[in-house]
Amino acid sequence: MKEKIIKFLQSEKSIFVIIFILEFVLTIFITPNQYDDATFLGWLESNHNVFHIVVDRYATWTSRVIIDFTLFSILKTSKYIWIVLQAAMMTLIGYAIVKLFIKDNHRKELSFMMILLLLSYPLDIMAGAGWGASTANYIWPLATTLFCFIPIKKIWYHERIKWFEYILYILALLYGCNQEQTCAIILGTYLFFNIIRFIKEKKIHPFMIVQLILSIASLLFILTTPGNYIRQNTEIIMQFPDFKMLTIQDKISLGLTATMGTILKTYNIPFGILSMIIVSYIFVTYKEKLYRVVALIPLTSICVLGYFGEIFYKVFPYLNAIKEELIAEKVILTAAHANNLFYALPVIFSIVVLFSMVISILLIFKNLQNNIAIFVFLVGLASRLIMGFSPTIFASATRTMVFFDFAMLIVALLIWQEWIKKNDKNERKIQRRIYAIVEMTAILQYSNVLLGILLTQK
């Protein structure tokens, strides 16, 4: 028995058991009965028919019928189903990341790094609109989206897919595509890899086409849902009265500045971790000053305007003006401000910081071809930038960052994988220090989330 336990702990499966247990410890203290959850529970008490509620919301509010049906059915039945499912979905995120991005070399070390990165995400963000509603609409679509990408890798490397896995991948895609941001991610990813595979091998895979068709059908369903138009008009009146006056350029600018503003306002941990790992890798790999300066821009920005902002503002008080404009819930650069360079600075600053990250990632992986890290980063960024075309960009700002946040964590893991692959003894000391910082961040963040749950739950 002892040998079996030791063997299990040394296996890959133990990684996922660890994630599940850690997440279960968090969720066991949560009762999803606040904010939106409380509203939904009230509906279920007055109208026990879940189907009728979902149909009504389809007609008047949202196209997320699969998500709604799942959430309402769980809330009606038992909170313990949600508790187990939430822990399982976080485990599924870890499982999908391992299957999609971690190679065989240093697999165990990378798996533990993945756990630390996963725990570094500030999960308490999901409490803002109700734990049940937020996780069902953001964490679960993230998990199912990552999972439905696994067949892309299997088909790419000509690996066998079991018959029941096809069913699971389809179900995962349907759930993921029921959320607007992840629908765009899934559709864009399947379209991209279908095209690339056709160019490379001059053939298509039937299942890839099926998944693409389902994602297109999901997008059409979203675009034709009557409730989405009613909700958009309601949200414009309640959240963003000037939204209809915005041009396409205004919305793109809004997506950029709101994204950067949210990163600074929330002292974004995934952005900080990725920036730190980028700087460390670039400094030990390149001697060119220009490369190092470019790599330093994101980390310097989050430190000066974020983590240590209060210290810097005492010495350089006007730096705070940039941050205040970025976190303001408005379009910063408009026709009225076009003649004042100051109002262009937040947009320029956002572009420079994000572009610096792109350039640094390209430098690390040295090419554009087969650069999955840059693809993940750009897809994650795009999922956030499209919120500039939604009147709820400020109302649900932090939650809608989740896909970009996890994209940055995945890129950090990919860079770490590239770094330890070099197996340079001189760089091991630096790597141990970076690992220790990530480890401490994960422990503190996990403790913070747990304390937040204990303090806010009734």
Image: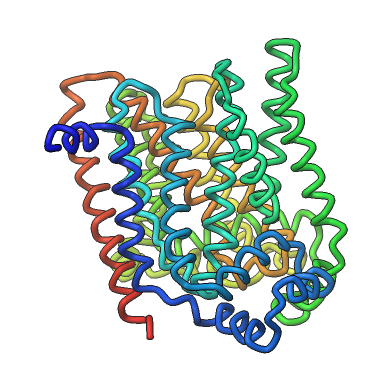
Q: Is 77 rendered above or below residue 180? A: below
Q: Is 45 rendered above or below residue 129? A: below
Describe residue 48's horizontal placement relative to residue 303 as left or right: right
Residue 178, how many percent across, how many down?
A: 70, 55
Q: Nearer the viewer, residue 109 or 168?
A: 168
Q: How many marks?
A: 0
Q: Is 51 rendered above or below residue 105? A: below
Which residue is at a point 49% across and 39% down the rendered structure image?
356
Which residue is at a point 43% across and 52% down the rendered structure image?
90
Describe residue 349's horizontal placement relative to residue 31 as left or right: right
Q: Quadrant of residue 332?
A: bottom right
Describe residue 431's horizontal placement relative to residue 160 as left or right: left
Describe residue 87's horizontal placement relative to residue 451 as left or right: right
Q: Nearer the viewer, residue 361 or 39?
A: 39
Furthest toward the front, the residue is 1
Res 406 seen here:
yes
Residue 183, how many percent across, how many down?
A: 69, 48
Q: Quadrant of residue 345?
A: bottom right
Quadrant (top left, top right, bottom left, bottom right) of the C terminus: bottom left
Residue 136, how many percent across, how many down?
A: 57, 62
Quadrant (top left, top right, bottom left, bottom right) of the N terminus: top left
Q: Nearer the viewer, residue 436 or 426?
A: 436
Which residue is at a point 52% across and 57% down the rendered structure image?
139
Which residue is at a point 45% across and 31% down the rendered structure image?
101
The image's colour scheme reads: rainbow
